Image: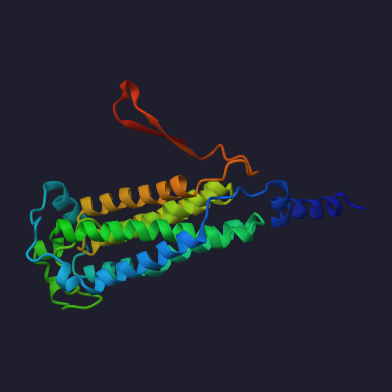
Amino acid sequence: MRPAAILLPALLAALSPAAAAAAEPSPELTYRPEVDLPIVVVGGAAWVASELAKKGLAPEPCRWCAANALDTSVRDALVWRGNPNTAHDLSNVAVVAVAPAAALGLTALAAWYDGRSENTAADLMIVAEATVVAMNLNQVTKYIVGRERPYSHFDNPDVLRAGEGLSGALPNDDNLSFFSGHATATFALAAASGTVASMRGYRAAPWVWANGMAIAALSGYLRIAGDRHYFSDVLTGAVFGSAAGVLIPVLFHGPRRGVAGPDTHGFRISLAPARGGVGAGVAGTF
């Protein structure tokens, strides 16, 4: 018998999801559906309600109206002249369809690839929870801060002449620029799905991180190109969304103690007092 005829079946068996599952049992993350599911449902409903009540909640006039030099220079360099609404539409597609499908789909695919499809429901619930919490905190901040959007501040005719609607300026939306909800949502999805995949020890975790962050970065760029947000709005949303996407799974859904699982030295995060006893520090390896 040829050596290849012997080695090929063995190689395929070694790479199969079943073999991966047998070699590395999955760590059990802390997951309480009686708690986590209501958070997602109630949080999602609260966000939708806050959108429907925008007319009564959105500040008028703006509370933060000025634009700084950095934001103005980045806007001038990146905004799409003549067709900013196209960038706006693409950013909506990214946040509503592409980013959720990629984050949730790749997380589920990573579990399946390692033969751990039984983790999928818990994994997706944790990702959704982190995203919903981040989005609600973002929404509260936007209503409180009341920053004027760049298209309104600079009277961009390419946006204003489109009228109110999905492709134009949304009703009662001119003063909700800080900070970007699109950036918050896409970076929270990317960071939460990557964090869950890393805590589980999935072999595809780096791909989950890379794909999610690439989509989130593109979404942030499109918000500036569409003249809906300043650079500082997008940067703050990216930092806040990423922090929520990492910290919520780590602090509330970490692996259960005493439960066997694969070695996950590649992902650790810890809180420790700062030297001198004042403040605290965060340390981690990724």
Percent from the top left, x then y, of residue 248?
A: 41, 50
**Going 46% across and 46% down the picture, which residue do you hit?**
250
Q: Is residue 60 left or right of residue 258?
A: left
Q: Nearer the viewer, residue 28 or 70?
A: 28
Residue furthest top as drawn: 276
Residue furthest front as drawn: 34
Residue 26's place in the image compared with 143, above or below, is above
Percent from the top left, x then y, of residue 183?
A: 31, 57
Percent from the top left, x then y, of residue 275?
A: 34, 22
Q: Is residue 159 left or right of residue 126?
A: left
Q: Quadrant of residue 112?
A: bottom right
**Going 22% across and 56% down the picture, which residue do you hit?**
141
Tally the numbered discs.
0
Q: Is residue 174 left or right of residue 283?
A: left
**Going 63% across and 50% down the picture, which residue do you hit?**
26
**Figure colour scheme:** rainbow
Residue furthest right as drawn: 1
**Going 47% across and 55% down the picture, which residue do you hit?**
193
Q: Quadrant of residue 258?
A: top right
Residue 90's place in the image compared with 190, above or below, is below
Q: Nearer the viewer, residue 47 or 13?
A: 47
Q: Can I make out residue 218 in this image?
A: no
